[in-house]
Image: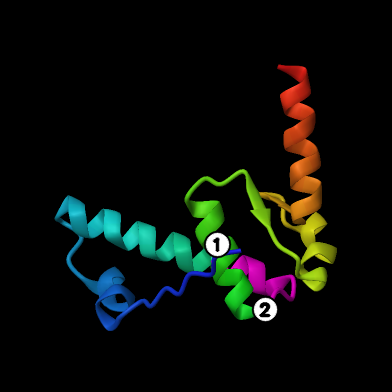
Amino acid sequence: MTKYKIYLDNCAYNRPFDDKDQLAIRMETEAKLKIQEDIRQLQQIAVKPKDSLHLACAIESGCRYFITTDKALLRKAALILEINVINPIDFIRIEEGAEWKR
């Protein structure tokens, strides 16, 4: 699994306090708050902070699957409704099954 690091600088954190009369500022504010909220929801179910960030990015970008070999994260997968958290073997099984149905 490729891991991504995301760094929200002070400008991103302060964006919600800027004048929202400009459309771009309003949109950036909403996007930043959405990312922050996604991370908080995931941390509430005891997902590690770095895993929360990865999951939030995958969810926000519209991924259907989050593939991991992290057993603790896989155990908590049932609590994560926005994305399918699965291991690589199950993903291949699903994809091979889809190939046979085409």
Q: From the viewer's perspective, is 68 left or right of 1?
A: right
Residue found at x 65% / y 74%: 43
Rendering coords of residue 11 (x, y %) = 24, 77
Secondary structure at badge 2 equals loop
Secondary structure at badge 1 equals helix
Rendered image coloring scheme: rainbow
Magenta region includes residue 42: yes
For disc 1, the neighbor class at 10 Å (few under 14, some 14 to 19, many from 20) is many
The tag earlier along the polypeptide, 1 or 2, is 2
Question: Dot 1 corresponds to which residue?
Answer: 56
Magenta region includes residue 35: no
Question: Dot 2 corresponds to which residue?
Answer: 48
Where's the N terminus, which quadrant?
A: bottom right
Q: From the viewer's perspective, is 66 left or right of 98?
A: left
Rendering coords of residue 53 (x, y %) = 54, 70
- Nearer the observer, 52 or 66: 66
